[in-house]
Structures are given as structure tokens and as C-alpha cells.
Image (cartoon, coloured by chain):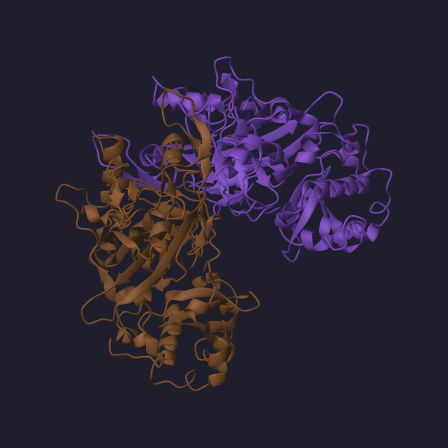
Chain colours: A purple, B brown
Amino acid sequence: MTTDSTHDSSLQSWVESANDDACDFPIQNLPYGVCLTEDDEPRVCTAIGDQVVDLYELACADLFEDVHESLADAFDWRLNVLMHFGRPFWRQIRSRLSELMSTECGDLRDDSELRKRAMRPIELTELVCPVDIPDYTDFYASVHHATNVGSMFRPDNPLLPNYKWIPIGYHGRASSIVVSGTPIHRPNGQTRPSDDAPPAYGPCRLLDYEMEVGFYVGGTNAIGEVVSIDDAESRIFGMTLVNDWSARDMQKWEYQPLGPFLAKSFATSVSPWVITMDALAPFRCAAFERDADDPQPLDYLDSESNRKQGGVDLQVEVLLATKKMRDDGKEPMRLSKGSFSDMYWTVAQMLTHHASNGCNLQPGDLMASGTVSGPGKDARGCLLELTWRGTEPITLPTGEERKFLQDGDEIIMRGSCERDGYRRIGFGECRGVVVG
Amino acid sequence: MTTDSTHDSSLQSWVESANDDACDFPIQNLPYGVCLTEDDEPRVCTAIGDQVVDLYELACADLFEDVHESLADAFDWRLNVLMHFGRPFWRQIRSRLSELMSTECGDLRDDSELRKRAMRPIELTELVCPVDIPDYTDFYASVHHATNVGSMFRPDNPLLPNYKWIPIGYHGRASSIVVSGTPIHRPNGQTRPSDDAPPAYGPCRLLDYEMEVGFYVGGTNAIGEVVSIDDAESRIFGMTLVNDWSARDMQKWEYQPLGPFLAKSFATSVSPWVITMDALAPFRCAAFERDADDPQPLDYLDSESNRKQGGVDLQVEVLLATKKMRDDGKEPMRLSKGSFSDMYWTVAQMLTHHASNGCNLQPGDLMASGTVSGPGKDARGCLLELTWRGTEPITLPTGEERKFLQDGDEIIMRGSCERDGYRRIGFGECRGVVVG
């Protein structure tokens, strides 16, 4: 991963709000999303400061003609078409976008008609799920999360023997992935609270969130073809925040022997913005440092560049606002703050492992990391861990207590990368309110 | 489920080969598939006798004008558009198709130009995956399979406590579903043959098939909406054969705690023909008869019509042809024959359970039953059971032995329904050759 002029911290935009230090979307970020036009047409867009820029309009005005003649076709739907292209092309578009938004360039800034067609405040824009997701896979890449959860259910043997050898994952449900802001229906399901009584079907009582980081696949490999660990980075388009809503009582009853099913597939939220791996280049870090007695990854999951630069120094936090908190005018309360650099497996290892059996990965496939939990108590990425199965309830500023989520509760996830000498970039938010 | 004139056993077709008793595709069947034109355009088609009929051509020639004005649009791609429509509409199309193919009707029979455009021998036709499958779910609905497999891995406790309460299932990988005839690459993967040695990455050594029956979803329910057991049948478009290829050594090492992953996602084969629920109406039967001490299904999974008519009396068989058998001119050898009526859960129960958490099911979603195994040894639907983990090898007519699949082995699956007073209908075949 190398940085280039698009990361220069002195770069400023003519969009004034982008130059604010606290802004998630400075000119160094340039994430991708999909907004709806007034006619409900999906359009690929970027965010800069507090503005959304419709890239289809820019392409139609020939502002990308040096990159590609017909880029408008790629901006006229979800991000899947763009994800088909490879990294060199993604970099050319980013480079041109950076130029267009910089104080040095008048191509868009000085064209008030085009600005009017292409730019709108984010808060007045409807952002939809940015990708038509063909397949969704959820990993389990935090050894802290796996150990915590394992120790609740198998105190003598918290971490299974395969954990440190295999990036454990499972196929998820793509149809029920929704964009941030979509209300989350409390699911009904089968649960068996007591072994002494038969199970029953009814509303989930142990509803939880999981703070995860997702990444979208770019490009294609044919069925039967693998992706080497050194090629894996070129197959990752960008990253996003994921809330893997979980019905813990349903999960406990259903998950053996084939894994989580309806406890997960009622809804999964994604943030509207995809932060490109090119924007994240300055924030790459070493992969997780394994203990001396941990196994080294098998050859197909190991490379020097992955060891040195496979991690992402991305901080994530989770906030909760209950209905009463909102009614009382209280700010959302932070429940946890973790780092994606604490994950045992890197994104490249997850992708390479996924394709290691010849599974064909397609543009737009979403892979999520599993709950991002760190070694500390304040870095636990779900209520199951934070309240230790409900035995240690959390007290909120209103005096309310929470073991698991109640109707009206809103979960807000945020992510950001900071490093000396570079502008901070943010992921925006992934929000969802539980409805009964 | 009621039968109508399209099931009349005396109905004959002007396509002579359809009137042969041994034919899978008599006029009473009329399955749907998707063929490629000479220009590689996908077209919805049906099979009758040994012929494929391109329904797009028939619609363009106004042969469906009494059903719908622009049905050609639905026949111009995969089956997904047709699957959007509801059962009443599916029945109208079937009824008209039955009429067009019958000896009484000259609309197609007497139009030699149209016949030339629309009809071709099946054996000269390229059939592709009939559906663009949004999500794929695999169930575990045979109590015989679950008990057999469980007794190998947990002799004291073969059947987990949830089995008789919940249709156990897991999300599968949609991208690697391939049509019958596609070669199956032996996957590489991580396995740990011995606890005394570290795992290694290499070719799967315990490659297996699973004989399954799949069904495709029609219509849509919004996220948060459930599907009642009595509405479930109307959400099933049709059934098909599924080979859930399985890498047993990879599965054993990877599957805990989140279920099968890469042991399954390297390939899943489907047969090219979808047999509609309307064609299957005469072959519906009672749901599995539970033992006196088995729990009754919870209310949301129970209805009188499901108990009486939820089953499908469908016989399935698996044949094996090794390379040596083919070279020596031997016929494929039958490995097993089972009945879908032996499944513990009905298709309606699987679908209703899947949507019971509000999961949105989409037209074209594929749900598979899990391995169809019966109570007898000759009704075991995979090699893991047939050879009891490889401890009881099968001897083939060439003198070869098989514990698991070798390169060059072809697995052939067939299915058919028979009942006194009705014409037998067949599912065609689901084939796949293992390549190294």
C-alpha cells in the first residue's frame, strides 16, 4: 500500500465544510455511495464535507473524459459496475475526483449550473444500499469476541481448536441487508428458555447488535480459481460499517449443528458510504501480532506484505439512544470503542480463505468481519459480551437499564481513521432503531 | 392441492415422443427450463418428450395472447420474472401450454415455420441454470440423515434436542450453483486428518455428493412479514434436483461453531428443469408421520392441509459411473433410491419457518431439503452414510472400490413421481463429473 498526492494532508477543497478537522469526508476520503434522484433513480455519488456529489451528472458533463469515455454507464446504478473494474482504474477515478474537488480546480466549482444539478446537502439526500449484494459472508475474526462468547457457552474450552488456523465464517442472508436508517423489526422466532419446558414461537427477548466492519469485493474469479494472499488486496474495493443484528435466544436454540440462521437473517444494516482501500492506504498497519505459542498462518494465508500491512488502524464505536433518552434530550451514550487492528485475521486472509476452495467471488459480494471486540471490557462490540449474557446490566443516563435491546432503542455505529501527518477520515454512521 | 384437466392421464400430445410411458416429460409435466439460442440468448422453455420448446417464440407468435399481452418479456431471460407472478397466473400459462401441446390443438403443430424456430431436440440444446438465484438456503430435513450423521459424530446423542422442533437450515452460497453437466473441480482446503499433527492445505480427499430436492420461491414478502403455513404452498413455484457436493474432511475441521462453509461453497449442482407444483399436484401425500413420542409441530408450522397434503411422493435415485466403468462400456451403477415422502419436514414448513423471523424471500430463491435419506440402507443419499464414513466401501462392477469420490467419477441423480391413474412424470437428470 502506497500513498499518493490524494492523501496529502495540506490538500484543501473549495467545498468549505470539507476542510473542517472534525468532518468525516475531507477531500482525502472521497467515499462512494448511492443516492436517489428526485425521480428515484439510483446514482453513484461521493461525499465531500456536508455535500453529496452525483457522479453521473459529472460524467455526463464530460468531467471524467480523460479517465473513460462512458463512465456515466458505471454511475447510473449501484456500485456493482464500478466494482467490476480493477484497482488501477479505481485509482484514476479517485485521482480525478480529488482534482475536481480541490481548490486548484474550477471545472465543477465554477460551473454553477452543473453544481446545482450534481450537488446537494447530505442531510437532504436519500441514500440507499450502495450495492446490489450478490452473496454475503460473515466471519468471526476477533479472537477476543470468540474467546468471550466461547467462555460463556464452553467455560472449559472457550476457543475451538480450529480458530487459530482458519478464518471461521459462514454464509449469510443477502436479501435482508438494509441501509442505515431502516427500522429494524424485532423478529419472532422459536426459543427454548428452559430445558424443562417445550420451545415456543414468539418475539425475540434477547435482541442484540454486533459492531462489525465489512468489505466489498471487486473483480471476479472463475469457479475453481483461487486468489493468492498477495492478490487479495486488489480484490477489495472498500470498507463499510455493518450491524449484524442478532437474536441471541433464537441463536442459542437453533444454531447446532449448522450455525446461525434465522437469528441473523431478519436484518443486517450497512452504512451508506463505502470507504475505498485507496483512501485507507495511509492507515494500514501490521497484522495482529500472534502470541509466541500461537500457530503461524499456513502458507496460503501468509505473506510478508500481509504481515506488515494487512491490518487497518480503524477505530469503531457504538452508541445507544433509547426512546426515553431522546425524549429527555439526552445525547446518545457510548457503549464501546474498539479497533479493527485487534482482529486476529486480516481482510486479505478472509478473502483468500473464502476463495481457497475455488469459490467464485463476485463484484459487490459483502464480507463482514464478525464482531469487533478488543482485549478491554470497553472494547466489546455487542451486548452479549458487554453485559456478560445479561448478568451485568448497563445503566443509562436516564436511570434505565439494558441487558439487551428494547423497542425504540437506536444503535449508532461510527468509524474513523487517524494518523499523525494525515487528515482524519470517517466512515459516517450506521444507524437502526428497533421497532416492535 | 387439486388436480385439473392438465393431469388427465388420457391426454396425448402431437409430439409423439411425449406419449412414451418411460418419458420424463409427458404432456402432464410441462416443466420450465432456460435454453440458449444460437446467439447465446437465454430463453424460457418447456420440455415435451425429447423436444425443447422456446416459449419466447410462442409468445412472440401471440400464442399466449389470451393469458397475457406481453408474456414474451417474461420468457426473455431466466425464470425469475415468471416466478414473480402468482399461482393463478402460473396455472393459466400451464393450462394454455397443455392445450398447445395436445393432439386437439393445431396452433403450433400446424405452423411449421414456428415449430422450426421454437422447437429443438433436447439433446442438441444447451440448457443453463434456469434461475438467477438471489439467495440459497440448505435445510436438513431428513431425520434419517440427521440421525445417521449424528450417530457417527455423537454416538451417545445422535439427534440434537432442537431437531424435531425446528426445520434446521443454513444459508448457502448462491454464486457457485451450477447447472447439471458442469464439471466439478475437486476443491482445495484446510483439513486436519490427525489431532497429533497440524492442519494442512491441499486437495480434498473425502469428496461426497448429497442427493437433495430443491424448491424455488415465487412471489415476495416484505422484510418483517411472515408467511403462514397455509400461504406457503402458494409461494413455491416448483421443484428440482440438487447435488450438494460436500468436502467431508474440510467440513469436519471447519464447521464448528458456525456451520458448513467452504466444504459446500465450491459447487452445488441443480438439474435444468423445474417441475411446477401444479404438475406435482397428483403426487402430494401426507406429511411425515411422527412417532407417538415425537413433539407435534408448533402452531406456526402446523395446519390440517399440511398434515394431509404437505408431502410429495417423489422417488429419487443416485447412480455412479467411474471413468473405468465408462471406458469398459458399463452402465452407471445405482447407489441408492429414496423417497422425498420420508422427509421429517415438508416444503411448506421449511418456507414458513424461513420467513418466520420476517426474512424477505424473493422470486428465484432456492431452498434445498438436505440429503434425502430413508430408513433403509439402500435409501441413504450420500457416500458418508452409504459407506459409513468409509468403513464399508462399495464395490463397483469393474471391481473398483469407492469410499468417497475419485477424479473422473460421474454422479447422476434422477427423480420421478408415479401414482395409479396418473401419468408418471420425471425430473430429468442432475449430473456432474469430478475433475482434479
Looking at the rendering, in which quadrant would you find the C terminus of chain A? top left
> Does residue B322 appear left or right of residue A170 in this picture?
left
Looking at the rendering, in which quadrant would you find the N terminus of chain A? top right
> Does residue B57 appear left or right of residue A16 in this picture?
left
How far from the left and from the top, in percent, is residue A113? 82, 53
Extreme front residue here?
Answer: B328
The number of numbered badges drawn on the structure is 0
How far from the left and from the top, in percent, is residue B272? 41, 60
Which residue does the image show at 68% across and 42% down from the upper left? A122
On screen, B111 above or below A80?
A: below
Q: Is residue B363 visible?
A: yes
Which residue does the image show at 48% across and 22% down from the upper left? A143
Closer to us: B305 or B91: B91
Closer to us: A86 or A114: A86
Closer to us: B83 or B248: B248
> Does residue B330 appear left or right of residue B182 in this picture?
left
Q: Is residue A169 visible?
A: no
Which residue does the image show at 81% across and 32% down from the upper left? A11
How far from the left and from the top, in percent, is residue A393? 42, 21
On screen, B37 above or below A298?
A: below
On screen, B331 above or below A96?
A: below
Extreme top residue here?
Answer: A292
Extreme left residue here?
Answer: B292
